Amino acid sequence: MNFSYDIVVIGAGHAGCEAAAAAARLGSKTCLITMDMNKIAQMSCNPAVGGIAKGQITREVDALGGEMGLITDATAIQFRLLNRSKGPAMWSPRAQCDRIKYSLAWRETLERIPCLHIWQDTVKELLVEEGAVCGLTTLWGVTFRAKCIVVTAGTFLNGLMHVGRHRLAGGRMAEPASFFLSESIARHGIEQGRMKTGTPVRIDARSVHFEELEVQEGECDFHKFSFMDTPPRTLTQRPCWTCFTNPKVHEVLQRGLPESPLFNGQIQSIGPRYCPSIETKIVTFPDKTQHQLFLEPEGEHSCELYLNGFSSSLPLAVQLEALRQIPAFRDLVLYRPGYAIEYDYFNPVQLKHTLESKLVRNLFLAGQVNGTTGYEEAAGQGLIAGINAHLNTHGGQPFTLARDEAYIGVLIDDLVTKGVDEPYRMFTSRAEYRILLRMDDADMRLTEKAWNIGLATPERHRLLAKKREAIDRIVTFARNYSIKPALINSTLEQLGTTPLRHGCKLIDLLNRPQVTLLGMAAHLPSLRSELEQLTERKEEIIEAAEILIKYEGYIGRERIIAQKLARLESIKIKGKFEYASIQSLSTEARQKLTKIDPVTIAQASRIPGVSPSDINVLLLLCGR
């Protein structure tokens, strides 16, 4: 049996769902192949979206017309805005979701897209002709012909799970691994390696003594993930809880280390340094007497709880005994143990910034197969891969994002320029232009781009235009409105800030940390009247305008730096040099430049091992 499509996406995780949805919405006849239609967009690890830097990525996915933000808002059972005590560049939204409702909402969303079909099967082999992918075959003997293929197979490629000395092939608990496909891809010269990740135990809430835990409630203000004018959260909001390990827990874990796959040689793969297992924590930090744990609900009404911070692959008996040393867990009952999983990934330096393979034309890779970890990183890659697969199929310029345009741009540039030596996780510290990549203005940065390629809907574009107009109006009002000391000094004294000696513009007053637009509106009728004109997303717009006013100097300074560095981005060098023959370059630079073949001088400057003196050599050769 043969089928023919413009684009076939392999794997229905977060990367695959975004890739398939984007390609189909842009007009490509698309097929999404998954091993289990009941596990679409499955939250394999914790049932949460967002967090530090990950929340910014989710908002960027939404601003570009992706689905993750909308579905998260619709299925959230707790929402929090992290890092409120820091500046807006660090604010990061995070939501707990109902795991089952999240997956179901994704499936319903995909089934409503006219150009998108779903096929349940396992892919066996890629078909490649004359250096370009042209189709695939499945275990059921079906052949799919395609102009582009996007591989988003997650942890399923030769997946191997570990609990103590027990090993079982699988992509995640109770699900089979995918064999053959990894070898089929590597056959074409694409480098592969092995990585490892893990997930904690799942706990039965009925066995927990919640009175021994500290409650962590969510927030119910206007913040959310999507920039669309969506209704408030409708699911029952649930708290999380926190507690700590103790020396008795560590003693049990220490005794179990000889049975740990991480320490007895059973696992050789690279694990995530920033999300270590509990056994790694006690070995790496032997002086620590406790580590914080977060107990998170898996659903609106479910008894299943996720123990964040206790990732482990120790034997089940060790995990259970250790946890029962915590007072709240003294009668603990588990649904399943924590486990580690090893899987194949492919070296991302062999990809273009569009996520197309440099070695096999029209083959795209996105998500954990590129060495990343996290739903959000996967979704961002999937969206970019889906867009570019459509553009390859129907013609059009490649769609990429620069490092000063999006965290997604930082993510992909890091992958294709630096590669990975551990599962890649996004942090705000990875971005040079954090003040430009705030969560509040992802739509201002990206929605126009999505509109130009046809992914943003007219309603999304209308909301952006209205928001931009409203913000400009508020900023202009603040810049022009004069305030006299007699009108405002008593209020300033109440706020604990210095009274005015002379009149000033409202914008100058708003630069003070204690002064806010809403606070001033209570005392300035003209400002109150200006803000009352807002009819949609009032709080969001006021917050965005205030950030622009208060951080205008920082934003302007960072934009100037980004513009200066953009000069290097404009100097194209791909295909210009035979690096191996340029003796004035260091040996390491010649090797790295040959392998990565950077597109621009700027990309070359970010390659580990390429020094500033090497960049100067290239600039001289370019006549700059």
Image (tube, grey):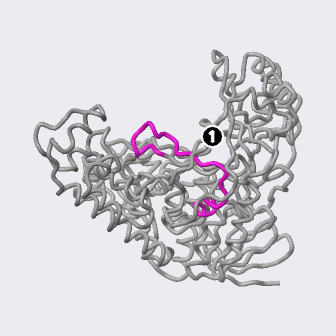
Amino acid on which the number 1 mark rests in the picture: Glu
The boundaries of the magenta stretch are: 68-91
Q: Which residue is mark 1?
A: 217
How far across and how far down the image is residue 73, in percent? 61, 59
How far across and how far down the image is residue 111, in percent? 71, 76
Membership of 255 in magenta stretch = no
Membership of 74 in magenta stretch = yes
How far across and how far down the image is residue 332, in percent? 86, 31
| Location of residue 490 (image quadrant) | top left
**Residue 275 visible (yes or no):** yes
How far across and how far down the image is residue 569, in percent? 33, 58
Say what secondary structure mark 1 lies in: loop
On the rendered image, what quadrant is the C terminus found in? Answer: bottom left
**Residue located at (35% from left, 47% from top):** 583
Task: Pick whichever, 252 or 84, lies toward us.
Answer: 84
**Residue located at (51% from left, 75% from top):** 455
